[in-house]
């Protein structure tokens, strides 16, 4: 346990990491509170059918608009887009609350609900910052694991908080608190400028004009996530129905909390492991094991057995989701990373909505236990999707290792007096140039391309990629390793805290690293 704690302490060694992680947690709470808050608010004065329809409108709007917002983030930067999109969502939620408070006609609720889906995917924004700081570093694995745990905690804390506030204070209080937290969290996260990922030049024109879903392998991950979403949505409905069937409906929340506890524990432990083998194989293994863990749900007879089965299922689902996040970071171009991560979140949300609807219909017709059949079938479909796309995913990883990288400015070259030059980078981790540095990488004033520094040594990693020697790269650019007075610590940069960090900035030929 001490070593595990030290692992997670180290991810916060990067300057500004604790600040943006805390702000990100506040900013992501509204997403978990929004649906429950709206349902409790409207059910107090209207029929449940209307409450469900408005909540569904917000969910569908978020699924449709979310990836487009993230696409704008990749193009124009987090701070600029985040504040605008959240501002629109805050205005729409405020209008929705005001309409309910004033007793406006039911139809007036739907336009506001549709616009409220403009809320950015805060978890994707935070993961993009971790990728910017720890690209190519083993610390990215525990960072993503910690992010997964925080997401689980937000869904444990958020819905009950919204329900309690709306019930104990007044019906509109839950959505009002949701709107306030969104505004505060967005401002706090946008204020963390030095950890904001820099804008990256796309490698190809299609990275600008086409959908990031065209990235090889991403479609497989999104479809698998749709299956996992159906698993989660159907499991929640079936658990509530089963608890009601055994006359302990009030304990359904406790049982679902046990599931979340298992997921959190597994996520924390998984983040401390040093894993070997190809990432695609670990992903496929995780999906298969996750599906097998759902089988005991078909044989539950009481709440104790159900709690144990859900605890096991939660422990085996979390590692799969963490591995998926790492895969997205590897195969999606750096210039479209936020959009790629948002598509997986969208797939999960769409799957959860479909799972809830399907399981509700099945439970209504065939009984509570039948709801878990939907869960198991969805898990098996996720396995089938992963198996069918396994080869394509492996090819996507291989292609990502050999693809030309996005270009940013080599600050070190200009400091050596050789003029700016293009610096190929991996998926993330290179800060933008210092104020006053040239923002385009071309050739020197004499018309000839400047000579590159000595090529650093490389070593092979378990999944066939290459890692660059931090010591050799730091030697190629001594001014970067010191960081003092060099101008490398630019606005929007996470800073240089080690030779490895300097290596990522001064590398003459850096490729996406796959050392996890």
Image (cartoon, helix red, strand yellow):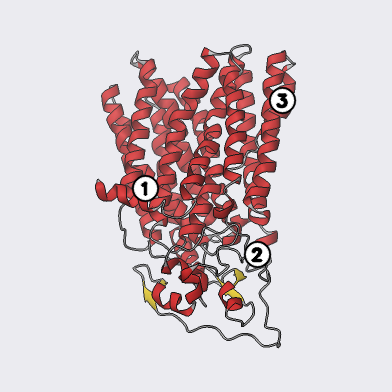
Q: Quadrant of the C terminus?
A: bottom left
Q: Quadrant of the N terminus?
A: top left
- Per the rendering, the mark at residue 319 is 1
Q: Residues within 10 Å of mark 2 (few under 14, many from 20)?
A: few
Residue 377 pos. (x, y %)? 41, 38
In the picture of the structure, the residue carrying the numbered disc 3 is 95
Please state if 317 lies on the left or on the right of 301 as rendered.
right
Say which of 409 and 411 sits in front: 411
In the picture of the structure, the residue carrying the numbered disc 2 is 435
Mark 1 to mark 3 CA distance (whole Å): 40 Å
Residue that appears at 68% across and 15% down: 101
Residue 230 visible in rendering: yes
Tell us which disc is closer to us: 3 or 2. 2
Q: Residues within 10 Å of mark 1 (few under 14, many from 20)?
A: many
Mark 3 to mark 2 CA distance (whole Å): 41 Å
Whether tag 1 and tag 2 are in contact, CB under 8 A, the answer is no
Residue that appears at 30% across and 58% down: 274
Please state if 365 lies on the left or on the right of 422 as rendered.
left
């Amino acid at each position: 346990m001490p070593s595990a704690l030290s692992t997670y302490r180290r991810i916060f060694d990067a300057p500004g990491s604790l600040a943006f992680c805390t702000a990100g947690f506040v900013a992501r709470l509204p997403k978990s509170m929004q649906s429950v808050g709206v349902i409790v608010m409207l059910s107090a004065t209207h029929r449940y059918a209307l409450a469900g329809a408005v909540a569904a409108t917000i969910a569908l709007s978020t699924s449709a608009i979310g990836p487009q917002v993230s696409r704008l983030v990749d193009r124009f930067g987090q701070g600029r887009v985040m504040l605008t999109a959240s501002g629109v969502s805050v205005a729409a939620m405020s209008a929705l609350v005001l309409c309910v408070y004033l007793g406006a006609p039911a139809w007036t609720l739907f336009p506001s609900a549709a616009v409220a889906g403009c809320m950015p995917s805060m978890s994707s924004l935070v993961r993009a910052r971790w990728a910017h700081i720890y690209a190519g570093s083993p610390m990215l694995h525990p960072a993503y694991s910690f992010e997964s745990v925080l997401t689980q905690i937000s869904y444990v804390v958020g819905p009950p908080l919204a329900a309690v506030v709306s019930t104990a204070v007044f019906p509109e209080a839950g959505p009002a608190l949701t709107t306030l937290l969104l505004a505060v969290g967005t401002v706090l996260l946008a204020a963390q400028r030095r950890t904001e990922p820099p804008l990256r030049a796309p490698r190809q024109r299609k990275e600008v004009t086409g959908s990031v879903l065209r990235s090889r392998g991403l479609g497989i991950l999104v479809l698998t996530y749709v299956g996992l979403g159906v698993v989660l949505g159907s499991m929640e409905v079936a658990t509530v129905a089963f608890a009601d069937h055994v006359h302990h409906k009030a304990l359904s929340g406790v049982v679902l909390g046990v599931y979340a506890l298992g997921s959190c524990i597994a996520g924390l432990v998984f983040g401390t492991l040093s894993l070997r083998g190809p990432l695609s194989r670990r992903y496929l293994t995780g999906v298969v094991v996750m599906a097998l863990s759902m089988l005991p749900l078909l044989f539950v007879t009481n709440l104790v057995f159900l709690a144990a089965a859900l605890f096991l299922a939660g422990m085996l689902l979390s590692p799969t989701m963490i591995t998926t996040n790492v895969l997205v970071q590897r195969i999606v171009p750096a210039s479209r990373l936020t959009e790629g991560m948002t598509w997986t979140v969208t797939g999960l949300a769409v799957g959860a909505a479909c799972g809830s609807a399907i399981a509700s219909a099945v439970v209504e017709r065939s009984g509570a236990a039948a709801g878990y059949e939907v869960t198991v079938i969805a898990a098996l479909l996720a396995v089938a999707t992963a198996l069918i796309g396994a080869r394509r995913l492996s090819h996507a990883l291989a292609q990502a290792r050999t693809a030309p990288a996005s270009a940013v400015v080599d600050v070190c070259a200009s400091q050596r007096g050789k003029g700016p030059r293009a610096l190929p980078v991996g998926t993330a981790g290179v800060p933008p140039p210092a104020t006053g540095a040239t923002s385009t990488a071309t050739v020197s004033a004499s018309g000839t391309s400047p000579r590159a520094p000595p090529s650093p040594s490389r070593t092979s990693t378990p999944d066939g990629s290459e890692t660059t020697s931090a010591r050799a790269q730091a030697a190629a650019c001594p001014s970067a390793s010191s960081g003092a007075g060099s101008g490398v610590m630019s606005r929007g940069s996470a800073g240089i805290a080690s030779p490895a960090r300097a290596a990522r900035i001064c590398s003459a030929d850096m490729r996406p690293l796959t050392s996890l």
